[in-house]
Image (cartoon, coloured by chain):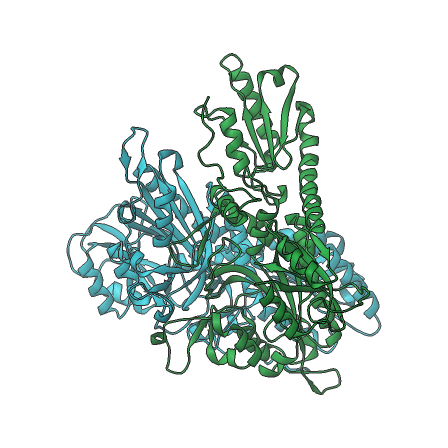
Chain colours: A green, B cyan
Amino acid sequence: MEKKSKEGLTAKKEEDTAKWYEEVCLKSELAEFSQVKGTMIIRPRGYFIWEKIQEYFNKNIVEKTNCENAYFPLFIPESFFKKEAEHAKGFQPEVAWIDPKLTQPGERLAIRPTSETIIYDSYSKWIRSYKDLPLRINQWCNVVRWETEATKLFLRSREFLWQEGHCVYETEKECDKETLQYIELYKKLCEELLALPVLIGKKTEKEKFAGAKYTFTIESFMPDGKALQCGTSHNLGQGFAKAFNIEFLGKDEKKHLPWQNSWGISTRLIGASVMTHSDNKGLILPPKIAKNKIVIVPIIFEKTKSEILKQSKKIKEELKEFAPILDDREEHSPGWKFSEWELKGIPLRIEIGPKDLEKNSVTIVKRNTGEKSQLKIKEIKTKIPKLLDEIQNELFLSAKKFSESNIIEVKNWNEFANGIKNKKMIKMNWCNERKCEDEIKEKTNGATSRCIPLENEKVSGKCPNCGKSAKVKTYFARSY
Amino acid sequence: MEKKSKEGLTAKKEEDTAKWYEEVCLKSELAEFSQVKGTMIIRPRGYFIWEKIQEYFNKNIVEKTNCENAYFPLFIPESFFKKEAEHAKGFQPEVAWIDPKLTQPGERLAIRPTSETIIYDSYSKWIRSYKDLPLRINQWCNVVRWETEATKLFLRSREFLWQEGHCVYETEKECDKETLQYIELYKKLCEELLALPVLIGKKTEKEKFAGAKYTFTIESFMPDGKALQCGTSHNLGQGFAKAFNIEFLGKDEKKHLPWQNSWGISTRLIGASVMTHSDNKGLILPPKIAKNKIVIVPIIFEKTKSEILKQSKKIKEELKEFAPILDDREEHSPGWKFSEWELKGIPLRIEIGPKDLEKNSVTIVKRNTGEKSQLKIKEIKTKIPKLLDEIQNELFLSAKKFSESNIIEVKNWNEFANGIKNKKMIKMNWCNERKCEDEIKEKTNGATSRCIPLENEKVSGKCPNCGKSAKVKTYFARSY
């Protein structure tokens, strides 16, 4: 018997999640480390997922909210950063600069870590009157943050791809409303497209965006007990408007400062989906983001070969909207092929052997559960789409169940510390004080507040860490 | 009578093409200069055109040729550049480097001016056997070239957006064939989507890509008599394969060097289309790349106002696939609105006034010709798409006629020099020698060889400049 593909995974999801995750990304050919420290290569199988995210986003977020795509320069003058003090302070440690020899003395150029400042410089010229508002612009681009931590494929690298939306409003009310709207649309994208359940909430003062009035976040829960920030929407208040001189003539014919928000998601979402769904056989992809949703493996014996191949090709043609792969290579056994395509995350396998053919049917195997079933050939066209939807749905539900079962509510420090040790996400009544938050991080060697849920839950009792009166419900966890 | 929009153009296309072009881009809100020297901002109206190019390209070029999209890092180690000597030499003067303080001594990082080197480093790991070939990968990204010449919106800037395709083949024959295929697909894109006629040909040794065996190009002819290089496809031979150690095990079980090509088009194409089609009233866009293909201007009098507006809305709804703008602002006169939307390049205007309504018709005005006609309201749905196709076609034909009528064949130096002076593109029998090419450039203060046409035309006589025997037909012109 032929040996199984040597390319299988060596690490186990439950034992060494980080190594397992890296192997999944590498061996399913989603991504690869580059020779340039801190950066990664997104291979075609991985980039396809990003294109699906872009497609969904352009249709369901950009178009639906009357936003428009545009493109601003990669380089940002140092002086722009300095205009908003909090923003400058927050990004300063991780900004990459270009060689000072290329520019005039006294004006360094940053490679954008985010584009608020350069975009708002333009807004100050474009906005004159209330008739120019609301202004909603989105940009797809690369950004650079000179991280010192180790590179994690899709999750942490010095360069990544993202979108950043930047809106300007006449009133605070509109701004509040849409800051929330965008984080809710992100949640929908994660859940509908990536089958990724997320918690929605507000960041604490410590964790909010540098320069924001407040930040909404969506957080997902990873198999190793860490939370992953998947997207943020910042209400910027009027701070940037003031710093960049953005003013508009109101209906009252007086000058006013507008209100602004900014919001972003990145290629990190690919990592979140991969880590959530995959298993020890390799990649599992929700069908909506898999390029090839089906692999057809003919079981070839000399006698029935031509009939089997003929039928396989017919099925391939019938299912072409799902970009099926017909793996008719004769140098590999069916078992080898099964492992290969399980590793690479094809959601559905169709096997056709002589026995299937006798019954005018095929064998179907679902990648997510390994569940096998028989399907009449004439039913393929109607049943396969349903099966793919079923897989998409099962992945979401099982991820949701997993994350829900790993959130625990705690009442005291002991429960908190044990929870973190046991890779749980903690929910608790909390004092909402910066000092206490710093202390918790230090005592647990890394647990941070993830978000304050938006639902109006009853808050009672004392803070499990400092003993002061609790003010809010808050989620805590280790994080990526 | 209300004054016409103050925002109209001040320069004339035929008098000061450069200034006129800049005004068209700025005032139609396609693009804008940025505060960062040498860079530009692509505004939503301009970025929409880029998205249309991407959409066409992904469908008709990436998919059709079995290519796949991927993403490689922005940063390229200096040592990668040095591996292919010609390539390094060609790009060295315009490479932007990041601050040396960010990296280890002795390993500077460039901001990619093009990605051959970093992509081929990966290819050397991905390619093992003839089964891995052909490999076809395309990347959409930003690139940086530290130009010293003045910025021209879309045509010349330190950062621009482009796609770069990078293919690897088993045989020279395949490589030759597809290097040609890609330039032909570019020509089709220019002509079908942008209504932009282009010449196709081979670059001379002097003008070919740094590191290539040969370069194919498409060149368009601009209204000021300059040629504009619109896209290139390079046969790289085996030079990069050698430099980057890309080898494959052939069917003969021996190691071989593969053959490679690379090919690219950029946001420059937006500029080419804008400069070709627009006029002294402002932007003219081929309907296929106009976001709003129609503007509806109701001619409002108190008595018929409600009926006119009702009808306008009905027409807007009927034509919604063309993203019509209904300009029902009452603070502006119809004439003001006509100028405004002519400036902004809406391909088709629909006017509805009381007299139109009496006849159950509307007045249609084509942006490209100013031609007016009446159209029965009930025919709108069937006739408008045809009219838009007609405009697209007319723009292409008129541009083609213009460029063809400005190409002259010359026999001697006098004709050559006069042709260049009179803003013509020159076609001639030429010696194809580097020294002569340098001389021509110097004597004419800037005319360069554009390309050697691919058709097998009969070559005869002497070179108009140096008098040596002619070897090829060649186009010469000033260029962007």
- Give left or right: position of B443 versus B286: left
Task: Please give left or right for residue B410 compared with residue A436 in the image.
Answer: left
Report whether residue A46 is seen: yes
| Position of the N terminus of chain B by quadrant | bottom right
| Nearer to us in this view, A310 or A193 | A193
Q: Residue A217 location, x and y as percent? A: 66, 63
Which is more toward the observer, A162 or B125? Answer: B125
Q: Residue furthest front?
A: A414
Q: Is residue B306 above or below residue A225?
A: below
- Does B11 appear above or below B255? below
Q: Which quarter of the image is occupied by the C terminus of chain B?
A: bottom left
Rendered location of residue B389, percent (x, y): 59, 52
Name the outermost residue toward the top.
A303
Position in image of residue B316 (x %, y %):
73, 59
- Point 48% across, 66% down: residue: A145
How many numbered marks have been drawn onto this rendered protein structure?
0
Percent from the top left, x then y, of residue A5? Answer: 46, 32
From the viewer's side, name the closer residue of B303 and A13. Answer: A13
Residue plotted at (57% across, 29% down)? A316
Is residue B285 visible in the rendered image? The answer is no
